[in-house]
Amino acid sequence: MVILVALYFGAYLPYQKSRFGILALHQIRQAKSVAEIEDKANIALDYFSPVGQEEITFFITDALISLIGRLDKTSAALAAPQLAAYLEKINEPIIKKGGGFNLAKALYSLGRANHFVWVQTDDVNFADKAEDYYKKCLIESPRRVQCLYGLLDIYGNQKNRSSDAIKIGEEIIHYWPTDNDVREILEKLKTQ
């Protein structure tokens, strides 16, 4: 009996959750509205399993970030802010749990999602949210280069933030001195 219980909780439920996750990823691509995306994703997210919740959350998060990046400007204005809010909602349990690699990954992912929404909609409020998430991620993972690049892009594309961009660019060069792309960006920023 103990073996059956162990198999049920240790193998069957995680297997089913992963199946629902894969199905959700396929169905999300064909969804016609944000509500439909949420419904499809929630089937996998709400399925009980003692393991796999954070992994499914990250797979869905990555898929929706990619979707935000592919939206045309008209669709982005309507759907992207709703998708970012949904991503904040589904990543909230990971953030509340705190600590570790998964927290840094969730914070980075939310920074990236809001960054994409800002790029798609030109709404600076999303740049501010992305900046906040990237900074929180750097507290958890101080040399996470993706967050540094995100901040460099945000600061470098806002008129009054070039000194912040230079500071971040110099930090990147400090840790990764062979990054010639960032060196080029710094040269341009310093000559403005």
Image (cartoon, rainbow, N blue to C red):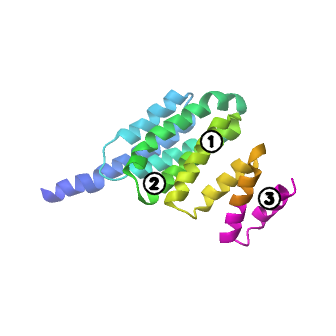
Residue 169 rendering spot, x and y as whole percentages: 72, 61
What type is the residue that disc 1 sits on? Asp
Q: Give the CA distance from mark 3 to mark 1.
A: 21 Å
Query: Quick check: 76 left or right of 91?
Result: right
Image position, residue 62 (x, y; %)? 55, 48
Real-space CA distance between mark 1 and mark 2, rounded to the nearest whole angstrom: 20 Å
Q: What amino acid type should be assigned to the residue bearing mark 3?
A: Ile
Does residue 55 appear to the left or right of 30 in the view shown? left
Which residue matches tag 3? Answer: 185
Residue at position x 36%, y 39% from top?
46
Q: Is residue 183 magenta?
A: yes
**Which span is picked out in magenta?**
169-192
Above or below 129: residue 147: below
Displayed quadrant of residue 143: bottom right
Choose mark 1 or mark 2, whichever is in front: 1
Q: Seen from this angle, which residue lies furthest left? A: 1
Label 2 SS: helix
Say whether residue 175 is visible. yes
Placement of 73 over or under 63, stated as above or below: above
For disc 3, the neighbor class at 10 Å (few under 14, some 14 to 19, many from 20) is some
Q: In this view, does 128 lie above or below 102?
A: above
Quarter of the figure that contains the N terminus: bottom left
Instruction: Name the disc covering residue 128, or none.
Output: 1
Extreme residue in the bottom direction:
177
Q: Is mark 1 on a helix, strand or loop?
A: helix
Measuring 76% from the left and 45% from the top, which residue is drawn there? Answer: 160
- Mark 1, Cα crowd under 10 Å, few <14 / some 14-19 / many 20+, is some
Residue closer to the observer: 95 or 171: 171
Earlier in the chain: of badge 3 and badge 2, it is 2
The answer to which quarter of the image holds residue 163 is bottom right
- Which mark is first along the chain, 1 or 3? 1
Per the image, the residue denoted by label 2 is: 103
